[in-house]
Amino acid sequence: MPDFISILLFLSVVLGGDRPAVSQSSDQSEPMCYDWGESREGAVSVLEGEAGWLSCPLFSHPSVYNYSSTQSTGHNLFWYRLPVGHDLEQPIGYSLRLSKDRERLWLQPATVEDSGQYICLLRNKSSCSKIAMRLEVLSRDQVASGPDCAVATAPSQVIIPLQEGKKLDCPDLQDAIKMADGGDLNVTWYHHCRQYERWNMDREQKGPSLLVHLMIDYYEGLYYCKVQYQRRGRLQQFSRSINVTAVNPPSLDKNPSIIHPGKDQVFSVKQGTEVRLTCTGLFPFLESPWEIWWTIDGKTVEQLADPHFSKINRLVSYNFGDRTEETVLVIKDFWAEDLKREYNCSLRNQKGSATRRAQLEEEGSLPSVELGCGLGVTLLLMLVLFTVYHVFWLELLLLYRSWFGTDERHTDDKEYDVYISYARNSEEEQFVLVTLRRVLENELGYSVCIFDRDSLPGGIITDETLSFVARSRRLLVVVSPDYASKGSQALLELKAGIDSMALDGHLRVILVQYRSVQRQGWVRELRRARLALALVRWQGDKSRELTSRFWKRLRVELPVHRVSKEGEACTRRLQSQDSTSSQTGLITKTAKDPQKVFNSVAVAAF
Ligand SMILES: *[C@@H]1O[C@H](CO)[C@@H](O)[C@H](O)[C@H]1NC(C)=O
Ligand SMILES: *[C@@H]1O[C@H](CO)[C@@H](O)[C@H](O)[C@H]1NC(C)=O
Ligand SMILES: *[C@@H]1O[C@H](CO)[C@@H](O)[C@H](O)[C@H]1NC(C)=O
Ligand SMILES: *[C@@H]1O[C@H](CO)[C@@H](O)[C@H](O)[C@H]1NC(C)=O
């Protein structure tokens, strides 16, 4: 028999290695043996010291070979072994440890030396077939799951819906029953490699099975079952594992739904760029196939077979069996034609389907309009502000002063708001005494000091002039051709004012022009002062109204008046003169209603 097998093997090698080949025996009475090569099912793994078995792979496809029917056609099954490092097959020496049961070869228990190639050969007088397979006996330290809860085989997968129950059976248990003396098996269950002496209400062991009555996520994970039995007085055992995962219960809605794009969502696209349309769908747990895809004018990317379009699919999230899947349609170099196409995203599973059309909108057109509008509005606003400022700057200034300006009366110890200096015996005298004084005192409520023309000239008044100027907040100089002729009262006032302004800054000089004056006619002091000071011009009848530019400019130059205060008289102290004569210029009156003035300013500004 060894000779026969070795010749077969030799021929099979010569005729083509692993592929099925027909071997010819030299003995014509022996049938040809059909060699199926090595089984594609992969190596069988058994843990060292545990019970294991090899099933002849010829019977994996019962439609081709059925063990019961082969027995009736006079077939016999033979096992051979090719130990590691050997060339020749050896027949198996059966024993209590190595036994044959129908299409199986049992190892109870397996040892590391049992590893190698095994061949099962099925033969009757007229036909013969054989197939090879591999056995790997692993030592406990070799297995990935570790020596404590070692299993040689991959875990079987079991899905349990949340809030529901299931019975867990140890895999391959039925195969072992006939090996056990009296069919008695002892099964121990572990979860996460931990043995529970007593399970709880949700999980209990009943017979060899573990019952899960009420599934929760905590019960997910690897379960181990250790099977022990007696065979002819010897203890045998093997272990298996089950990977339990929880899924959402079947009572929930199982229709797929589109998460993205939303119903009214618009994708903005830009010509000449790569456009990516993302579609995301939710597939509730179902043990059925599912699908998510884009169509372009009703055609899938595959149907179009256009390099312009491609897709990227991925799993976004997985939650108790519910999967969120994404497909991205990539359009290389988007052009105007693509904008006219119809892009639909579709989902489908066993329960239903959904489709949504993607709304595309070209980027750039809308933003440029918006940008244009925004810029236009801004420019217009700036123009309006600019105009408002230029037309109403005086009003704005007055308004600002009325709100935020400080009333100088509270911060200094001066007696008069304005000291008016003018050329006596001139056209301006009338203007000063009638118009200026009346408005400043009566309408605006300032305390005004004017030295009467009768007081001129006189050496005695010099000191007094200076002291009055020094006690005023403003020196209002009414410029005229005759102003400040040499040695006049006016020149004295002007010098005193300019000196005081230059020295301590507590007095400010305001220039008012009643009629136009040739610059050449001005005295030197005035010409110098003009360089640094504003000139407020009287413009005839136009300036009569209190809301005119003349008065506004003048008020900007004058001190801030918040609250009306009794004006003090600028008392003439000229002992040499008749005290009753020409008192007119020195009477000071109080403001009637300063609030009215603020209001008129506010109305003028807005
Ligand atoms: C094998 O054949 C027997 C009878 O020949 C039949 O009863 C049995 O169902 C078959 N098994 C399979 C798995 O087809
Ligand atoms: C051997 O088996 C084949 C089927 O595989 C059958 O046709 C043939 O009759 C059997 N030969 C004998 C001698 O039983
Ligand atoms: C158990 O199954 C889950 C889901 O099917 C998988 O993610 C996990 O890796 C499995 N665990 C093992 C140890 O096989
Ligand atoms: C695309 O989807 C819309 C609904 O969103 C549907 O009316 C239209 O028929 C679909 N187009 C194609 C080609 O399937």
Image: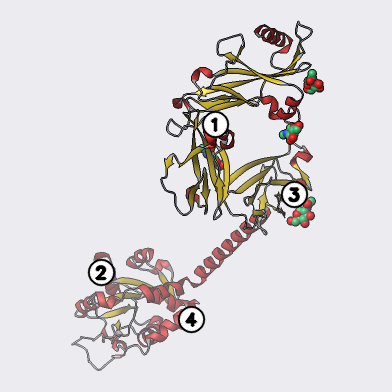
Other residues around mark 3 within 10 Å, as few (<14) / some (14–19) / many (≥20): some
Alpha carbon separation for disc pair 2 and 3:
80 Å
Other residues around mark 2 within 10 Å, as few (<14) / some (14–19) / many (≥20): some
Q: Quadrant of the N terminus?
A: top right
Kind of residue at badge 3:
Leu
The nearer-to-camera label among 4 and 1 is 1
| Of pointers 4 and 1, the one earlier in the residue sequence | 1
Q: Which residue is mark 4?
A: 603
Q: Which residue is mark 3?
A: 339
Alpha carbon separation for disc pair 2 and 4:
36 Å
Which quadrant of the structure image shows residue 497?
Answer: bottom left
Q: Which residue is mark 2?
A: 500
Circles 2, 4 touching at the beta carbon (< 8 Å)? no
Q: Residue at x 39, y 85 (%)?
A: 595
Other residues around mark 1 within 10 Å, as few (<14) / some (14–19) / many (≥20): some
| Of pointers 2 and 4, the one earlier in the residue sequence | 2
The nearer-to-camera label among 3 and 1 is 1
| Of pointers 3 and 1, the one earlier in the residue sequence | 1
Kind of residue at badge 2:
Ser
Kind of residue at badge 1:
Thr
Kind of residue at badge 4:
Val
Alpha carbon separation for disc pair 3 and 1:
55 Å
